[in-house]
Amino acid sequence: MGRAEFNVFRFLGSVIRMNVHLQDRAEVALRSLDPPEREKVDAALRMLKETDLDGLRGSQKLRALKLASQEKLYSFRASNILRLIVSYRPSKWVVEDIMERDRLARLLPANGR
């Protein structure tokens, strides 16, 4: 299992297995970050490994993105500047991309958060 795939077990009465998979685009973005930024993204990835979508509902770190397509994507705050663009499937987070907050704002419709 390389850097792109993580497994984690969490105990809350039962074992929940969460996977976090980085798409190629996210891998490239992660490798291009300076070490302090990379550490913040690694901490965000660890947080994703430790919880599922229900566990993050209502969190200030996770925001649903309003897109023209039907695809459900979320922005997960890794730092003041960086956002992980993620999708969720049962037992699996997929990190689609890593981008700066300002770039994300330019790509979204005015009300897309």
Image (cartoon, rainbow, N blue to C red):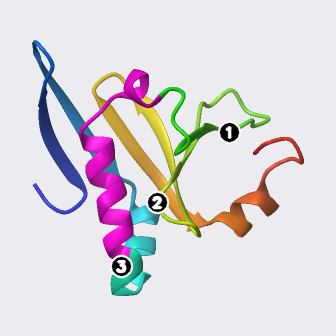
Q: Residues within 10 Å of mark 1 (few under 14, many from 20)?
A: some
Q: Amino acid at mark 1?
A: Leu
- Which numbered disc covers residue 65? 1
Query: Eyeballing the image, is 14 above or below 104?
Result: above
The residue indicated by pointer 2 is 78
Camera-side mark, 1 or 3: 1
- Name the residue: 42% across, 81% down: 33
Find the magenta span and give its range. Answer: 38-56
How many residues crowd mark 3 within 10 Å: few (<14), some (14–19), many (20+)?
few
Element on which disc 2 rests: loop
Left or right of residue 99, residue 39 in this image: left
Q: Which badge, 1 or 2, comes first in the chain's sequence?
A: 1
In magenta segment, residue 46: yes
* Residue identified by numbered label 3: 31
For residue 107, what is the image quadrant?
bottom right
Of the two numbered discs 2 and 3 in the rendering, the one whose residue sits closer to the viewer: 2
Q: Amino acid at mark 3?
A: Arg
- The residue closer to the viewer here, 11 or 102, is 11
Which residue is at 59% across, 31% downward?
A: 72
Q: Residue 41's x, y, as percent?
A: 38, 65
First in sequence: mark 1 or mark 3? 3
The single residue placed furthest to the bottom in the displayed view is 34
Nearest to viewer (mark 1 / mark 2): 2
